[in-house]
């Protein structure tokens, strides 16, 4: 609230200086309001400290919020009126040029509302005195810009090893029970204690992985929806989404998938207290084999009583020493705690108050990370907040109170998201913007301020990182349940509820402004009553009936900043949307049916983010978008004819960043039009897609000139080019980190005419190059060049896909470590030997090639992985395979003519650890060269016509895992099997229909821990408990027969 009031104060000051009050007839009232706001702002820090223990202050906050929103609306109206006046009288020097009579009605309405607000605000200001709120501000205990000290990304999991082993032991021995078809073990503990973490440790334990198949995880949360849980389990097994089915067929489907299998299911974060609901789900799950188990985590003992069949595991608190280790990692980072002995003493006292909850220790340690004054640490230790009730962790409330003022509102707002929701960084920043919780400052744009807020919340352990983008930046976060509770408690104290009355999110998980709407007419009617709405988000993907039309009544939401219709089925937007003068964010991502944008888009002068990514049906865009100079996100542009969008309109949009797609570049007639786009000035662009229509019949193409003119800034990380008809690419591609080329007619990557320019490139950045469907590509360079060409000196990954005329030798690329060649029948294979830093080589789908040249694999002494797949005519591997002394993994797949692995080629592979031979049906022997494979630990042979296991397998003394899959003619395993494979731990036999017995020597294999037999119709039944072969395998701890 203090941050929001501060923004209101700044807005009022700005409007007074611009004489907007005179325009609206409320100049005097604005001055009075500014004085009152300043008075209120002075006591907000004291109110923040007392709100959790004083109900009267909570009610005062709620009144203040209501009036503050009214003020915001009035100021918004004044600013919008001023913008309209300025637009109509753009030639005037002052707003006072606007005829007074022209806005008399507006002035009267604003004046009346302002007087009403002043009356309410005076009462609130007077009440602060009665409540004893003081303007004596405590010093700030956090400086957001101070970045001393080191951050530790993730502390180790402490104090849970013993508990994990206990649970693993219990689950493993459940197979011996006869009284339960499925066992349920509940884990109970308070929020933040680490229930989920313990369940994850159990779930990923090696013994568990060998003992249970399948292993399934479902996050349940408050909504115990049996149908949703069943669908989630089915999807986890099938790895494909389940269609919309009724409950009964879903139940049958799940039972068919689980029947006869020893499964492990984790139901995480269960809140359901209805025994009937659990019994319905349990009855469906009682279909597995003996030993099937369910682990459930919950905060509530009652839930454990309802669900559990095994003794409840009550999660213990961490010891003070373990909590101190976590706290120390956060508070001191890599600094030695011993450098601050006094702080260590105080810190250990603070840790005692954490109650053994790991999240509390992390949060307080993160809070004190940048603090090195004893007074700051003592403030934490002595804070009265510790004595608050335990429903919300006091440690985290203290962390909230010590957030910078501008962060508090942002954090509390996150209560509108459901518990466990994955929050996208861009999404939450846009919502903060729309609700006036962040604003720009002298040095940072509002979006950059938002990024810093997200980063700070992450550093303070109030946000947890979930997912990173391809460039390594965290873009998705979660809030721990305990932290979410904290945010909700703040929202309830200040707003009287957890919803924001200025945000509407419509979906099946409606969390803000709850409402049920059926039909466009009802929606239109409802919108007319939501004049103060700042953000409207329609989540069509969660609704049975897709959102297909935006009603014209949308224009009545005059305060709207954020409109998100992403993934809806809208075909067009109404022109009335262009009346939303205050709109800053328009989300249309993946609106696959959207064909056009309104002609009046140029009137949305405050628009900052026009998110059009994935609007694949968008055929044209209106002119005038270039006037939206506030744009930071554009998503995509579709070039039109004379009346449509022109590329030159990008000239002044230099703040556009992120990802930009430009469609229909073939419509550019003159390269000057491309130059006017000034892409090189757009420093914030990270991804650029440039697309021409590939199927064109013009006699002359200007693609070369256009692409040269579209040179981006050096900060670009990903460039994707499609449909390019030029003969080669400009030398500037070396300044981009990653380049993908699709369906191009180019003959070279760098042509002869560009070589001189490219060679002069001092600091090339090109690290990844992907080339697909280039029927004319002859080579990387337009002519042979001696030495290293600068443009490729930093290239690390190179992929060719369907480049049939690629014939020229590959140039020397000193940094290349990954090469992938697919469907390139005329490749100059021998030139691969020049890539001496290569570590990964994959060759696929090469027709007509019976053998590789011996030179190809020479000099590749660093190669670690070699994959050869789908080579229908390959008969032999080169003898130079032996030169790959660092090779660790060799994969040979779908080479039907390959009959053996040459003995001479295997002799040098002493480092080989993994060998995969798949669908090479005629490969019946491995050759005696396999004796050299002393390091081989993993062998898989899949798809072979052999009648016996190759004799050479006995020479793998280090082999730990052996997989024999799809041997239709295999009748038995050799007697030497158990005598020679003395290190084997894991054996899999699959689809061996003629295999009937196991060798007796398998009984001697004391290292064998896991045996899996699948689809072996003769052997499988004989190996079941009590079968003819059972005595041979009963010593194996983990066995599965399907």
Image (spheres, rainbow, N blue to C red):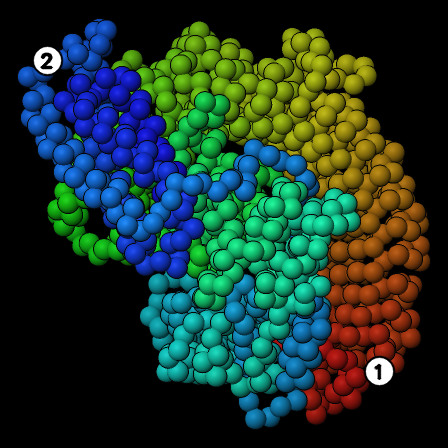
Rendered image quadrant of residue 850 = top right
Query: What residue sits 67% from the left and 74% below the top?
Result: 163
Residue 1003's label in the rendered image is 1
In the image, 1013 versus 180, the foreground residue is 180
Residue 839, relative to residue 446: is it above or below?
Answer: below
- The image shows residue 683, relative to residue 559, as above or below, that is above
Tell me: 435 left or right of 148.
Answer: left
Image quadrant assignment for residue 323? bottom right
390 displayed left or right of 379: left
Residue 433 visible within the image: no
Q: Nearer the viewer, residue 1027 or 528?
A: 528
Is the N terminus in the top left, top right, bottom left or bottom right quadrant?
top left
Residue 99: give its label: 2
x and y, in percent, of residue 633 in the image: 41, 29
Q: Is residue 567 visible?
A: yes
Q: Residue at x 8, y 18 (%)?
A: 102
Q: For the residue carrying disc 1, how many other residues have a C-alpha within 10 Å: few (<14), some (14-19), or many (20+)?
A: some
Report the side of 947 relative to 470 (left or right).
right
Quarter of the image with the C terminus is bottom right
Residue at 51 percent of width and 40 percent of height? 139
Q: Tag 2: Cα neighbours inside 10 Å, few (<14), some, or many (≥20)?
A: few
Question: What kind of element bears circle 1?
Answer: helix
- Where's residue 744, x and y in %? 54, 25
Q: Which mark is residue 576?
A: none
């Amino acid at each position: 609230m203090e941050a929001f009031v501060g923004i209101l104060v700044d807005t009022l000051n700005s409007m007074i200086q611009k004489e907007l009050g005179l325009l609206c007839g409320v100049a005097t009232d604005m001055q009075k309001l500014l004085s009152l706001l300043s008075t209120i702002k002075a006591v907000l820090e004291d109110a923040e400290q007392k709100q959790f223990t004083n109900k009267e202050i909570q009610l005062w906050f709620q009144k203040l919020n209501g009036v503050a929103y009214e003020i915001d609306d009035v100021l918004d109206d004044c600013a919008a009126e001023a913008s309209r006046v300025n637009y109509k009288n753009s030639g005037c020097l002052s707003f006072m040029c606007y005829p007074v009579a022209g806005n008399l009605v507006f002035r009267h309405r604003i004046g009346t509302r302002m007087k009403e607000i002043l009356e309410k605000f005076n009462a609130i200001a007077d009440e602060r005195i009665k409540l004893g709120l003081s303007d004596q501000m405590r010093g700030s205990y956090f400086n957001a810009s101070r970045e001393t000290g080191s951050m530790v990304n993730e502390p180790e999991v402490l104090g849970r090893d013993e508990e994990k082993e206990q649970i693993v032991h219990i689950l493993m021995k459940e197979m011996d029970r006869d009284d339960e078809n499925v066992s349920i073990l509940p884990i109970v503990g308070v929020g933040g204690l680490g229930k989920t973490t313990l369940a994850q440790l159990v779930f990923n334990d090696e013994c568990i992985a060998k003992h249970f198949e399948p292993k399934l995880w479902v996050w349940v949360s408050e909504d115990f929806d049996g149908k949703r849980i069943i669908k989630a389990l089915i999807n986890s097994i099938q790895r494909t989404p389940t269609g919309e089915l009724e409950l009964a067929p879903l139940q049958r489907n799940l039972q068919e998938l689980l029947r006869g299998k020893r499964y492990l299911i984790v139901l995480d974060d269960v809140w359901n207290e209805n025994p009937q609901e659990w019994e319905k789900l349990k009855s469906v799950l009682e279909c597995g084999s003996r030993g099937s188990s369910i682990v459930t985590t919950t905060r509530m003992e009652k839930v454990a009583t309802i669900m559990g069949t095994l003794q409840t595991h009550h999660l213990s608190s961490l010891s003070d020493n373990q909590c101190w280790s976590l706290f120390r990692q956060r508070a001191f980072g890599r600094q030695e705690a011993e450098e601050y002995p006094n702080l260590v003493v105080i810190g250990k006292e603070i840790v005692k108050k954490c109650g053994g909850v790991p999240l509390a220790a992390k949060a307080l340690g993160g809070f004190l990370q940048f603090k090195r004054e004893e007074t700051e640490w003592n403030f934490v230790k002595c804070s009265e907040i510790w004595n608050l009730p335990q429903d919300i962790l006091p440690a985290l409330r203290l962390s909230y109170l010590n957030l910078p003022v501008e962060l508090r509102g942002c954090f509390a707002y996150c209560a509108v998201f459901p518990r466990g929701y994955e929050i996208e960084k861009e999404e939450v920043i846009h919502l903060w913007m729309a609700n006036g919780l962040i604003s720009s400052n002298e040095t940072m744009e509002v979006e950059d301020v938002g990024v810093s807020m997200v980063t700070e919340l992450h550093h303070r352990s109030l946000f947890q990182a979930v997912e990173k983008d391809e460039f390594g930046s965290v873009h998705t976060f979660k809030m721990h349940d305990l932290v979410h509770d904290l945010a909700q408690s703040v929202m309830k104290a200040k707003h009287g509820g957890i919803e924001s009355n200025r945000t509407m999110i419509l979906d099946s998980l409606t969390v803000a402004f709850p409402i049920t709407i059926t039909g466009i007419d009802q929606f239109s009617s409802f919108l007319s009553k939501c004049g103060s709405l700042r953000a409207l988000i329609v989540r069509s993907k969660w609704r049975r009936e897709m959102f297909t039309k935006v009603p014209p009544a949308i224009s009545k939401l005059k305060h709207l900043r954020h409109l998100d219709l992403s993934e809806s089925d809208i075909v067009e937007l109404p022109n009335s949307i262009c009346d939303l003068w205050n709109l800053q964010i328009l989300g249309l991502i993946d609106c696959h049916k959207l064909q056009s944008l309104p002609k009046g888009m140029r009137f949305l002068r405050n628009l900052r983010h026009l998110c059009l990514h994935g609007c694949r049906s968008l055929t044209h865009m209106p002119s005038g978008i270039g006037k939206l100079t506030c744009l930071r996100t554009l998503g995509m542009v579709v070039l039109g004819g004379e009346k449509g969008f022109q590329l030159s309109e990008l000239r002044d949009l230099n703040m556009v960043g992120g990802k930009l797609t430009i469609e229909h570049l073939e419509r550019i007639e003159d390269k000057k039009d491309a130059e006017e786009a000034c892409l090189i000035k757009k420093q914030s662009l990270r991804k650029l897609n440039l697309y021409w229509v590939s199927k064109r019949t013009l006699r002359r193409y200007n693609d070369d000139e256009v692409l040269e003119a579209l040179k981006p800034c050096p900060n670009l990380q990903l460039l994707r080019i499609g449909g390019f008809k030029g003969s080669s690419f400009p030398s500037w591609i070396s300044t981009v980190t990653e380049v993908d080329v699709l369906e191009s007619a180019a003959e070279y990557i760098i042509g002869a005419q560009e070589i001189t320019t490219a060679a002069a490139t001092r600091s090339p950045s090109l690290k990844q190059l992907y080339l697909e469907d280039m029927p004319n590509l002859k080579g990387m360079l337009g002519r042979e060049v001696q030495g290293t060409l600068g443009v490729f000196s930093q290239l690390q990954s190179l992929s060719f896909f369907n480049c049939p005329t690629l014939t020229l030798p590959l140039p020397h690329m000193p940094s290349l470590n990954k090469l992938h060649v697919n469907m390139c029948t005329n490749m100059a294979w021998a030139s691969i030997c020049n890539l001496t830093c290569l570590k990964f080589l994959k060759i696929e789908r090469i027709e007509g090639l019976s053998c590789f040249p011996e030179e190809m694999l020479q000099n590749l002494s660093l190669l670690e992985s070699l994959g050869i797949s789908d080579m229908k005519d390959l008969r032999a591997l080169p003898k130079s395979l032996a030169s790959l002394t660092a090779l660790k993994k060799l994969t040979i797949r779908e080479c039907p003519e390959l009959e053996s692995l040459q003995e001479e080629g295997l002799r040098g592979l002493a480092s080989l650890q993994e060998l995969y031979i798949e669908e090479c049906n005629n490969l019946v022997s491995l050759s005696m060269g396999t004796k050299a494979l002393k390091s081989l630990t993993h062998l898989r042979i899949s798809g072979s016509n052999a009648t016996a296991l190759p004799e050479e397998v006995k020479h793998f003394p280090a082999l730990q895992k052996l997989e024999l899959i799809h041997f239709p003619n295999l009748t038995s395993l050799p007697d030497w099997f158990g005598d020679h494979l003395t290190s084997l731990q894991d054996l899999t036999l699959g689809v061996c229909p003629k295999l009937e017995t196991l060798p007796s020597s398998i009984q001697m294999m004391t290292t064998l821990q896991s045996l899996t037999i699948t689809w072996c119709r003769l052997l499988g039944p004989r190996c079941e408990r009590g079968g003819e072969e059972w005595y041979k395998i009963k010593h194996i701890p983990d066995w599965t027969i399907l």
